[in-house]
Image (tube, rainbow, N blue to C red):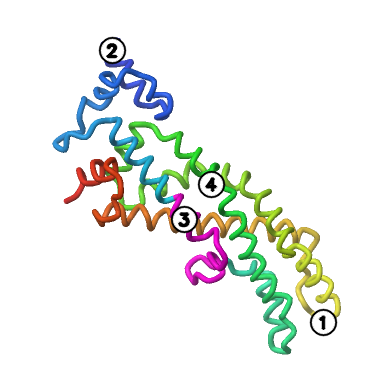
Amino acid sequence: MTDRRAFILGAAAFPLVACETFDPSVLDGVLGGQDGANGLSAFEAANGIRAALDNGVGNALANLGILNGFLGNDTVRIPLPKILRDVQSYLAPVGADGLLVELQTQLNRGAEKAAPAAKNIFLDAVRGLTITDAFDILRGPDNAATEYLRGRTSTGLAELFSPIMENALNGTGALKLVDDVSSQLNSVPFAPNLGADARRDLVDHGVDYGLRGVFHFIGEEEKAIRANPAKRTSEILRRVFGAYDA
């Protein structure tokens, strides 16, 4: 392997933000100059995937970060944690589950407030995309970009999203409602015990389902961009995804 070829192959493993500082004539040769028959350059492939993910994140947060974005959507509505659903089964038959109904509402309200605050977290994560990743994603299934983002960011996003969600749940009164439910259960024979970590469990549950909802919308946007030319609203999206139309 020549020194030049070793350099080019090594460059493909760098994130796009690092590669953008190299000479474009070198970058165009990263994967053999052009991508097979469709003549797609490395820059175009990587920028197209970035644009698709940016669109997906923007679409997700626009749909979820509004009143009833979670609560009003059957697909992404956040349920109560299982233990609280079990509690509800004790209280609902006697019409005493009002606090739990309100708790689920406020849990979803917390996610609706948290979603917009996470915008930069998601967009920053896209910057780790490498040129090699971009070509793999383009050749992959219709949710390949979404799964790339989920696989590389879920843990970090959960850690960053958690305090946002906790603050939002505090602001909506959801965490106080957990204390009220725990107090009410003391007078209900054989009712489950929520335990000392009920507040933390609620926050973790909200983060988990909140991120599921965001990735659901990112995935739907990716599928639409791949399948529907009308969804390719910029030249880079038309160039990149049009090259892979059947």
Label 2 or label 4, whichever comes before in sequence order: 2
Q: Are marks 2 and 3 in contact (CB under 8 Å)?
A: no
Query: In the image, what residue type sits under mark 2?
Result: Arg
Q: Which residue is mark 2?
A: 4
Q: Which residue is mark 3?
A: 60
Residue 208 appears left or right of 231: right
Label 2 or label 1, whichever comes before in sequence order: 2
Q: Residue shown at 80%/60% (left/top)?
A: 196
Q: Which residue is mark 4?
A: 119
Q: Position of residue 241 (x, y in %)?
A: 25, 46
Q: Secondary structure at mark 2?
A: helix
Q: Quadrant of the N terminus?
A: top left
Q: Position of residue 21 (x, y in %)?
A: 39, 20
Q: How many marks?
A: 4
Magenta part of the protein: which range? 57-77
Label 4 or label 1, whichever comes before in sequence order: 4
| Closer to us: 12 or 118 | 118
Q: CA distance from mark 2 to mark 3?
A: 42 Å
Mark 2 residue crowding within 10 angstroms, few (<14) / some (14–19) / many (20+): few
